[in-house]
Amino acid sequence: MGSGTDTSRISIFPLSGALLFPGLQLPLHIFEPRYRALVTDALARDRMIGMIQPVRPAEGSPLFEIGCLGRIDEVEALEDGRFNIVLDGLARFRTVRELDVTTPFRQIDAELLEENEDAVLLPIERASLEQESRRFADRQGYSVDWEQVSRLDDMALVNGISQVAPFDPASKQALLEANDLNERCELLVQLMQFYGCHDDDETGTLQ
């Protein structure tokens, strides 16, 4: 999967606040008829679905430019037509155009983006991220296995926090659109500091 002028036709699931990053998994419960049709179609073809956020949580909303292509790894077909699926994140994509289609689900032409899978953080960046993650988790009341976290490689750590952190959709989109691992890490630290300070202001707590 390369970048350049080559494009791929992608069936998309526009869902605000639900982001998928390359190398990570996203569990989804599929119940709307059009997205049941999307999953059925994907299973019959290549098992591929593009996750992308709508600009507004409204029917037919324009889409953000960047999303992530996922492959259905696990699927549970329920008797009433619903699905439980798990998507494996494969690659980010940039939307080129939305297609005029007769399917109940939306489709786009998109350019797949290459990722530098060998990218690493500087030791000071890694230390800053882990320190801010601990502060943020403590403020949010999260229970985290920090020993397990410390064993994650840089890409898995940065993308994992970016995917699950309780930021607003625009902030999560900015993380997905970051050009490289270092830029995403820097933004992630800034967002955790911002949200942490905001939470402190609301509760009147001083750090």
Image: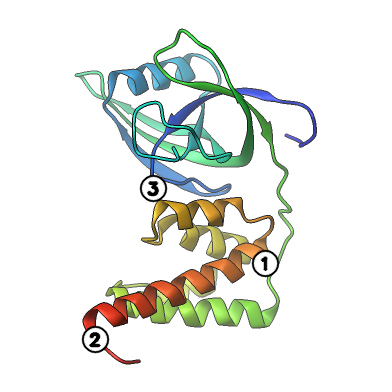
Mark 1 and mark 3 lie on one chain; the one further toward the N terminus is 3
- Quarter of the image with the N terminus is top right
Q: Secondary structure at mark 2?
A: loop
Q: CA distance from mark 3 to mark 2?
A: 28 Å
Residue wearing tag 1: 182
Q: CA distance from mark 1 to mark 3?
A: 23 Å
Q: Secondary structure at mark 1?
A: helix
Residue wearing tag 2: 204
Circle 2: residue type:
Gly
Residue 67 lies, in percent from the top left, at 55, 40
Q: Most extreme residue toward the top, as rendered? A: 102
The answer to whether mark 1 and mark 3 are in CB contact below 8 A is no
Where is 193 relative to 111, above or below?
A: below
Between label 3 and label 2, give the one nearer the viewer: 2
Residue at position x 46%, y 53% in the image? 170
- Asked whether 119 or 182 is in front, the reply is 182
How many other residues sit within 10 Å of disc 3, few (<14), some (14-19) or many (≥20)?
A: many
Q: Secondary structure at mark 3?
A: loop
Mark 2 and mark 1 lie on one chain; the one further toward the N terminus is 1
- Asked whether 135 or 193 is in front, the reply is 193
Between label 2 and label 1, give the one nearer the viewer: 2
In the displayed structure image, the side of residue 22 where residue 17 appears, left or right: left
Where is 203 relative to 62, above or below?
A: below
Q: Most extreme residue toward the left, as rendered? A: 80
Residue wearing tag 3: 17
